Amino acid sequence: MKGSASNLKEKTVSGMIWSFGDTVSGQLIQFIIGLILARILSPAEFGLVGMIIVFLAIAQSIVDSGFAQALIRKGDAGSRDYSTVFWFNLAAGLLLFVLLYFISPVISRFYDEPQLLALTRALSIILIINSFSLVQRAILARRLDFRRQALITVISAVISGALAIWMALNGYGVWALVWKSLTGSFIQALLLWWLSSWHPVILFSWESFRELFSFGSRLLVSGLIDTVYRNIYPLIIGKFFTAQDLGYFSRADQFTRLSSHNISQVVQRVSYPALSQVQDDQVRLKSGYRKVIITTMFITFPALLVMAAVAKPLIVVLIGEKWLPAVPYLQLLCLAGMLYPLHAINLNMLKVKGRSDLFLRLEIIKKLLAIPVVIAGIAGGIRVMIAGMIIHSVVCYFINSFYSGRMVCYPFKEQLADIFPAFLIALVVSGLVWLLSFLLPFGNIYLLTVQLSAAIILIIFAAEITGNKGYIEIKSIITERGKIFKRFIK
């Protein structure tokens, strides 16, 4: 039992590191490419692609239908299950491509943007491409094998990014962004097939389908609701404001996602399969759950609050002064996204416990609470809408943590006590970093360098003298992995 626990911890830590490498390396490359493209293309061109994202995201959720999560959770999933899901994904991808192809004129008229007709039809091909590799990706996640996924992500990001930059420099405009997405998805699918040991057979089991769908269907509906919610804001901005406004919002949102959403993605990808393996051991489950929350929020709070503090020099240095209107959006979105990893971790616990029914009910309640935020945004503008997103995020955290915490005897009061020290460190440090912008007579490049350097030093210093639990856990993981590496090179 002890050996099994040690092996699971080792696989989880290794998976976390490779998942972090996969997500961060891929997103960092995408981010850098995005910075280059932002200097070449206009905010309006980014806004055009942003208008289509909501429709693609909803369609992609339907293609997956929660089957990937169901496969990961099912302990004895085999070739019959994999093939059943594969053929369903492929059929759903083809049907949704056809649907989007024919409703693209409606989308174009909705936004009053003629270019969206061709753009929507082209980007819809991604649904077919992705449907070929969803099962392979789920199998790698089951095995906590994120090393291969990291390799695939980096290769696809570099090739698709290089193509997009070349196209942007040669006057292809918004089509550079379209081909970047298409090429990246195609290369990922190709490499997943090449590196995967499993390939589909001509087999579809209704028994397997019903079993997986009974769990995944609720996640499908929950995912659809969450997808609509996350993309309703770009849709509202694109409809009631301008493509340029949406470009500013989307770019600010991309900066925020580099921290909050990617941290959440790493934690979800690893913690869900890992905690699923100890779902019947209440003591180990709570211990792992608690460690995930403490370490995740020690990273998240400083990352988001410091980003808000350095937003202006960050925007100017990385993508230029033409993007300055995105600064207040970025600052507010950092606050709105600060609790996002906590939402993901708490909701993960419901999936681990097999409560997809409760997961669905909570998603419906929380998204109904977002309706006033959308109305306020239409009436009061984009900043008012983001302020509403901040309030909504706080309310949703209390709802999520109440139910998930009760399942493992880890209520939100204990969670708050565990994460408050990290929040306090991040708040004080970000405040000091923000004051530097008024005290130092530097240009944006030097100011940003000094601010970020000061932030890192102050966070580590504060964590050391206070003995922050999240910091200690992260440091122990780094130390253990370092010892393994030293033994390896000897």
Image (spheres, rainbow, N blue to C red):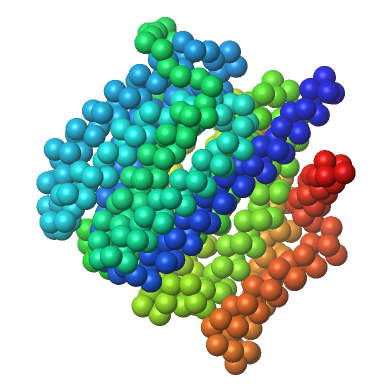
- Residue 10 location, x and y as percent? 76, 34
Q: Residue furthest bottom?
A: 441
**The N terminus appears in which quarter of the rendering?**
top right
In front: 374, or 125?
125
The quarter of the picture where residue 173 lies is: bottom left
Q: Is residue 368 left or right of residue 447?
A: left
Is 192 situated above or below 432?
above
Is 50 situated above or below 102?
below
x 47%, y 52%: residue = 158
Residue 381 visible in the displayed image: no
- Residue 191 location, x and y as percent? 47, 35
- Residue 312 location, x and y as percent? 49, 77
x 37%, y 55%: residue = 163
In front: 226, or 258?
258
- Residue 157 location, x and y as percent? 46, 50
Q: Is residue 67 left or right of residue 275?
A: left
The quarter of the picture where residue 414 lies is: top right
Is 40 situated above or below 483?
below
